[in-house]
Amino acid sequence: MSASLPARCAGILIPLFALRAPGDYGRGDIGGLRGFAELALATGHRLIQLLPIDETAPGEASPYSAMSLMAIDPSYIAIDPAGDDADPAIAGGGRSSGSVDLRRLRELKERRLEAALRRCQSAENDGEREAFAAFKAAEASWLDSYALFRALKERCEEREWSKWPAPLSRHEAEGVGAAARELAARIETLRYFQFVAHRQWNATRAALRSRGVYLGGDLAFSAARDSVEVWANQEMYDLTRAVGAPPDAFSPTGQRWGLPMPNWRRMRADGFRLLRERIRHARKLYDVLRIDHVVGLFRTYAYPCDGEGEGAFDPADEAEQRAQGREILGIILEEAGPMRLIAEDLGVIPGFVREVMAEMGIPGYKVPRWERDYSAADEPFIEPHSYPMQAVVTTGTHDTETLAEWWEAAGKDERAAFLSALHIGGEASAARAQLDEATREAILEEVYRSPAQLALTPIQDLFGWRERINVPGTIGAANWSWRLPFDPGEALRDPAWQARLKRIRAISERTGRFASSAG
């Protein structure tokens, strides 16, 4: 078994919810990782890079708006579907179509898990009970508050914690203690869900490591305002303001994400306790950790929650921004241990952010279709062979249009200039309105040939699909619901797919990103 992810390698970006496996309930789960790992190996990739798997509120699809930053969403627990064919949660072809009612799915899985808890508590399950007790003791620092918060949300009909009766809404010790006693049975059940989720995760991670496949996680910038972290640590946030992004070329009016504004002064006085706890917890789950919205750690843009007034950066001074970013990244590095760190630094990023990242050895992103020399009159694309080793080269992210979409929207001249920068000839290829397979694979090969140590490709760009994971600034059923269009096991057995997979694997091998002996 490989001791760690090879320095030069390739990975596939895919959300956990997008996986597909026999017997799932219409949404990807932990059980789907093993089959997908075999597909990753067949294409010469050793890293599976996921989006956050944190638990979200019922009905919330975005993994970047979590109800808990420590809990694994119970909907990701793999459950044997035997006997559930008639359940409304999976009726109407949910298993094959990807259209599934998340509330009903969660209810169904929780019913099955409640039955498992009863078996765990029986006299015949001494080993299970001991393992559960050990998990509760090891994870008590976050597990107890999380389970109480979830139980209170249910009792209060899922209302935001700010609308709970006092003293619960103020997280006063007396009221919290009384609620914990009243809801003890439900709290124990919710703890058990997390025990099962983490046990499945750990077993799956070990199985993947034995095959030389590694897991990447995503450190979301913040929990949702309506989350256990904010409820239990209200003094660590400025709840009169909400995090977003300033106006820019992509969004003239800016973006309002609704995330709670960190009170950086108080978090610093507290030794950045919450951040340290998050990184230590992530270290138990992942081999690689992506820091989302890294610029927000240097300077956080926030708007007044009442909608009045303009947004502003905190801190406002550049010297303070630089110092804060260095301080916080230093803490993440300190707590990360053996995890490899990468950071999302796309968009309008001050130069000092990338300077600090480079000094600290944290790779940022290089997206070839955005890497241009804007100081030159014709703004030529920058050749990938000039990228630094300390970088993540990628064709896109979960928030960007796919490579196929970009190709169709770009004009012939832009496509030709792009291919030229990648040393891919052919006027005929640039003239085609749609990205053909041969050209896409040639693009992948040149991208993978760059010096950047990690090449990370969204699954859509690996196979030329157009469907997106998310369109920022929009709300709709298409966001956060895409699923892999095939079962990886079936693709591995299909001769036509086998040929495609071998071609992609050959790209990884030729560019020094995969050696079968490494696993």
Image: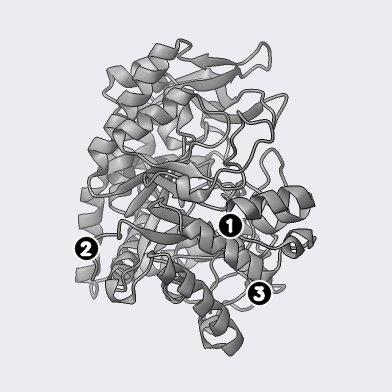
Judging by the rendered image, the residue that carries numbered circle 3 is 96
Image side of residue 440 versus residue 224, left or right: right
Query: In the image, what residue occupies the spot 21% across and 49% down?
Result: 137
Are there few (<14), some (14-19), or many (20+) residues within 10 Å of tag 1? some
Image side of residue 482 versus residue 218, left or right: right
Q: Above or below — where is 52 with respect to 207?
A: above
Q: Above or below — where is 156 with respect to 413?
A: above
Q: Secondary structure at mark 1?
A: loop
> Where does the N terminus fall, quadrant-wise?
bottom left
Judging by the rendered image, the residue that carries numbered circle 1 is 423
Between marks 3 and 1, how big is the CA–CA gap? 41 Å
Q: Quadrant of residue 263?
A: top left
Select label 3 or label 2 by which is in front: 2
Pinpoint residue 24: horizontal percent, then vertical percent.
54, 73
Are there few (<14), some (14-19), or many (20+) residues within 10 Å of tag 2? few
Q: Amino acid at mark 1?
A: His
Between 194 and 492, the one nearer to me in the picture: 492
Query: In the image, what residue occupies the spot 65% across and 74% down?
Result: 96
Image side of residue 72 versus residue 17, left or right: left
Q: Secondary structure at mark 2?
A: loop
Between 156 and 194, the one nearer to me in the picture: 194
Q: Quadrant of residue 31?
A: bottom left
